[in-house]
Amino acid sequence: MEKLYKFADKQLKSKDDKFWKDSKLRDFKKITDLLNDFHEVINPAMPLEFKTLEKSAPYWLHQIDWLQERFPDAAYDDVIGLCKLATLEDIKEQDYSLNPGRYVGVVIEEDGMTEEEFGEEILILHQRLQGLDAKSLDFQQLINANLNSFIDN
């Protein structure tokens, strides 16, 4: 854990870090090199293949974008539905419970629809569901017929 902390502190320490600032970072070579360095620090006895890094680079880029969106200044902030830095007073108010749900709450996202638009959307989705249900019944009957003909032979 100490190695991990030192590596992260050195590589991703401040908001001035070029990897942090560039939210549209798509240079897989730089990310691959950074991940390789990270792996060497954490587990030098086990070599990490480039193929693995190449496949995981999009995953890590997505994670970087996600973090940058929520923490644009590269500093910890309370984010509703995600995290909160609880004070001792906050913890006392919650009867010393450390259950995350008591602190972070939930995020209610607005979809920008009016009630009428929402109702129309639900009706359309319900009609699609009914159509898919009917198709599924047809397929189920076809499968049963095929299996019965197979068993009869």
Image (spheres, grey):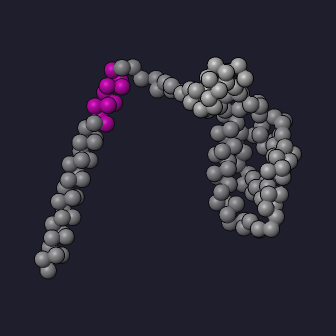
Determine which quarter of the picture holds residue 56: bottom right
Q: Is residue 144 left or right of residue 64?
A: left
* Residue 50 locus on image (x, y percent): 72, 65
- In the picture as drawn, the residue positioned furthest to the bottom comes out as 153
**Which SS does the magenta portion mostly show?**
helix
For the point 66% across and 34% down, the residue is 69
State whether residue 13 appears in this view.
Answer: yes
Front residue (pair 98, 119): 98
State whether residue 36 appears in this view.
Answer: no
Task: Write down the region rendered in magenta.
Answer: 116-125
Depicted 32 relative to depicted 5: above or below:
below
For the point 61% across and 23% down, the residue is 94
Front residue (pair 4, 19): 4
For the point 68% across and 60% down, the residue is 54
- In the picture as drawn, the residue positioned furthest to the front comes out as 95
Front residue (pair 25, 123): 123
Q: Is residue 118 magenta?
A: yes
* Residue 95 locus on image (x, y percent): 62, 23
Q: Quadrant of the C terminus?
A: bottom left
Q: Is residue 19 left or right of residue 99?
A: right
* Residue 132 locus on image (x, y percent): 26, 47
Q: How many marks?
A: 0
For the point 36% across and 25% down, the residue is 118
Determine which quarter of the picture holds residue 34: bottom right
Determine which quarter of the picture holds residue 76: top right
Q: Is residue 38 left or right of residue 104?
A: right
Q: Is residue 90 magenta?
A: no
